[in-house]
Amino acid sequence: MKAKTPRQDGPARQLVRAGLLETPLPFLGDTEGASVPASLPAVIDAHVHLFPDALFASIWQWFERFGWPIRYKLKAPEVVDFLLGRGIDQVIALHYAHKPGVARQLNAYMADFCRQRARVTGMATVFPGERDARRILEEAFASGLAGVKLHAHVQCFDMNGPAMDEIYQVCMAFDKPLIMHVGREPKSSAYPCDPYELCRAEKLETVLKTYPGLKVCVPHLGADEFAAYRRMLEKYANIWLDTTMTLADYLPFVSVPQLSAMRADRLIYGTDFPNLPYAWDREIKRLCRLNLPEESLAWILGQNAARLFAIDNLAQ
């Protein structure tokens, strides 16, 4: 299926009144490239969202109201066609259950999608504390899903709470990574809970110490507690960080760490596609301009994700 031409959104600067940003947004009409530069090693986009059509539409409506304009309103098959057609070698597909009782259906959707797309590695989800959570994940792993995605800002879970123990335990039992958005940012008054209460870095450190066999990947370099997450990379063997949206110079973060000063063997490239306001390759262009050693760039762009998510055809 040929992907639709992405929509080029509105005015150059917009003011989000009650959402993720409360300052004017940077210029949104940046030029996108036709493909990943041919000189790059294998590229895995390890932070791509895939949802059924109706749920995608609801998510975009929320972002348009409280976050930012969505530039790429593509259905799930079109999302994958778009990225693979532009030189991305593999997609790590994420979703999350926004309420109890929907995870099984979402996981079945993801597993079926991945069976039809060899270059898509799908994550499972569950709503922490929901009935039969352990069994939901066991079924998802049996169907071929390669890990779990949770989002504390949406699901409002306490990562140190008792409801999380069985999730950690089943991930360890099946040796599956857990992707948890537990950084404090981007915060929104539209969320049903306060990420600054739920998502302090020391809470994640407790998880790492209590469950040393659990593989945890935190998106957005742990924004905005960058220094704390950088220290945890050095201290613990069971944490990875993805770069999603932190390299784009879009969100109003201060003191974003230099990747050259971080452990390149624990950093993973991701974008948040298709839920972006800017060009799909904005971050990869900026990553290439950092002049990282070739080995470090290869690790970040693909090899670390290949190892973490057991993608054998790309792992070296």
Image (cartoon, helix red, strand yellow):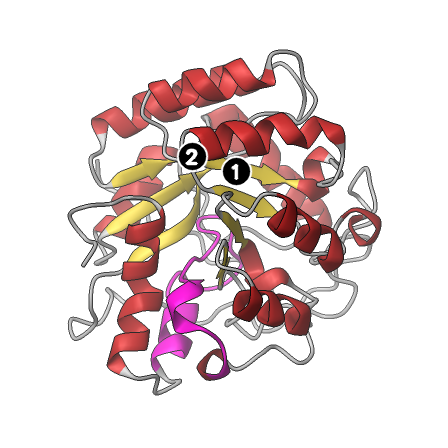
Q: Is residue 284 magenta?
A: yes
The answer to whether residue 263 is left or right of residue 66 is left
Asked if 57 appears above or below 188 in the picture, the reply is: above
Q: Is residue 112 magenta?
A: no
Q: Looking at the image, which is closer to me, 18 or 147?
A: 147
* On-image quarter of the C terminus: bottom left
Q: Position of residue 122 (x, y in %)?
A: 37, 34
Image mark for residue 149:
1
Q: Earlier in the sequence, mark 2 or mark 1?
A: 2
Q: Secondary structure at mark 2?
A: loop
Residue at position x 60%, y 37% in the image: 59
* On-image quarter of the N terminus: top left
Q: Looking at the image, which is closer to me, 24 or 119?
A: 119
Q: Position of residue 145 (x, y in %)?
A: 36, 29
Segment colored magenta? 261-288
Q: Are marks 2 and 1 in contact (CB under 8 Å)?
A: yes
Q: Marks 2/1: CA distance?
A: 6 Å
The crowd level at tag 1 (other Cα within 10 Å; few <14, some 14-19, many 20+) is many
Q: Position of residue 79 (x, y in %)?
A: 35, 42
Q: Residue furthest bottom?
A: 291
Residue at position x 52%, y 14% in the image: 135
Image mark for residue 123:
2
**Residue 144 placement: quadrant:** top left
Q: Secondary structure at mark 1?
A: strand
**Residue 99 placement: quadrant:** top right
**Residue 265 placement: quadrant:** bottom left
Identify residue type, mark 1: Lys
The crowd level at tag 2 (other Cα within 10 Å; few <14, some 14-19, many 20+) is many
Q: Is residue 66 visible?
A: yes
Identify residue type, mark 2: Met
Asked if 120 appears above or below 106 in the picture, the reply is: below
